[in-house]
Image (cartoon, rainbow, N blue to C red):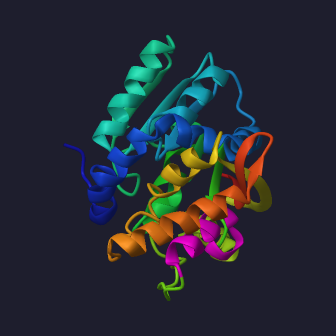
Amino acid sequence: MPEIVNIEQAAAWDGPSGESWLAREELQNAALAAPTERLLAAADMHSADRVLDVGCGTGDTTRACARRAVDGDVLGVDLSTAMLARARQRAVAEGLDNVTFEQGDAQVFPFPAAAFDCVVSRFGVMFFADPEAAFANLARATAPGGRFVAVVWQPFERNEWVAVPRAALAIGRDLPPVPSDVPGPFGLADPERTRALLEAAGFDAVTVADVAVPYWYGPDVETAVAFAREIGVLRGLLDDLDDRGTARAVDALHAAMSEHVTDQGVELDSRTWVISAVR
């Protein structure tokens, strides 16, 4: 059993959060297609690169890296047993023999020193309980001249994809603010803090690019409503409501999603930071 020190996140992702993601895997990957493209473009992967994917989940980004680093190899690391099992199945089905997956906590995982030419993460590095230790560990694992590239969410208030459905589900209730700078989806929302963390870990030439891309909720409103109710920061907002309150909240969510129907389906705005650095 690998050493795990990020106990709270491990309990979530190797439990209900991981199971919820598995249940909506294809839709979730489609929702994140636009930021994934930006991540991979910034990584500028070479065919012989040795790549590490941090917080790889079911391996969508890991497999995309493996298809680029065709003469190299790719390691995906995640806390979730179930998501990693799915990732391995997907890689076998695609016939990718240059990719492996390991369960582990990036804060303490014993990566070989200077083993990777490129370290990437799609919305994985915001969940570190100890980001100083985690980024230092990743820096040690990155070869001199190697690249670190991650995509993370900007502050909650700038992300329509989550702010709009949350306001709808609130139905007038005063909900507690969504925290930033703590382990969670918005844990690296402050770009200057992120820059300082990476520089302290040993990375140079840190850039933080402001990227606005659509978040695709599905082909129709009904799919979008069901999807939104399962998203981590929205899940549970109906728990304290009675049947009438729940019906009101779901109706409000349906109305909110109906306002964002496009020719491509239901789309809301999202704002991310694409972070790049060199070891």
Q: Is residue 212 visible?
A: yes
- Residue shown at 52% from the left, 29% from the top: 74
Of residues 245 and 31, the one drawn nearer to the viewer in this rendering: 245
Q: Residue furthest top?
A: 95
Image-quadrant location for residue 167: bottom right
- Residue shown at 52% from the left, 79% from the top: 171
Q: Position of residue 96 (x, y in %)?
A: 51, 15
Q: Is residue 109 visible?
A: no
Q: Residue furthest left?
A: 1
Of residues 206 and 229, the one drawn nearer to the viewer in this rendering: 229
Q: Position of residue 66 (x, y in %)?
A: 58, 24
Q: Main secondary structure of the magenta part?
A: helix
Above or below, comparing residue 225 to residue 90 in the picture: below
- Residue shown at 58% from the left, 43% from the top: 119
- Residue shown at 64% from the left, 69% from the top: 164
Of residues 115 and 273, the one drawn nearer to the viewer in this rendering: 273
Above or below, comparing residue 41 to residue 208 in the picture: above
> 155 left or right of 98?
right
Q: Residue 5 magenta-drawn?
A: no
Image-quadrant location for residue 225: bottom right
Q: Position of residue 198 (x, y in %)?
A: 61, 64
Q: Quarter holding the N terminus?
A: top left
Q: Residue furthest front?
A: 244
Q: Position of residue 108 (x, y in %)?
A: 35, 55
Question: Which stretch is magenta?
Answer: 156-171
Above or below, comparing residue 50 to residue 254 in the picture: above
How many marks are shown on the rendered structure?
0
Q: Residue 157 magenta-drawn?
A: yes
Above or below, comparing residue 180 to residue 50 in the picture: below
> 77 left or right of 120?
left
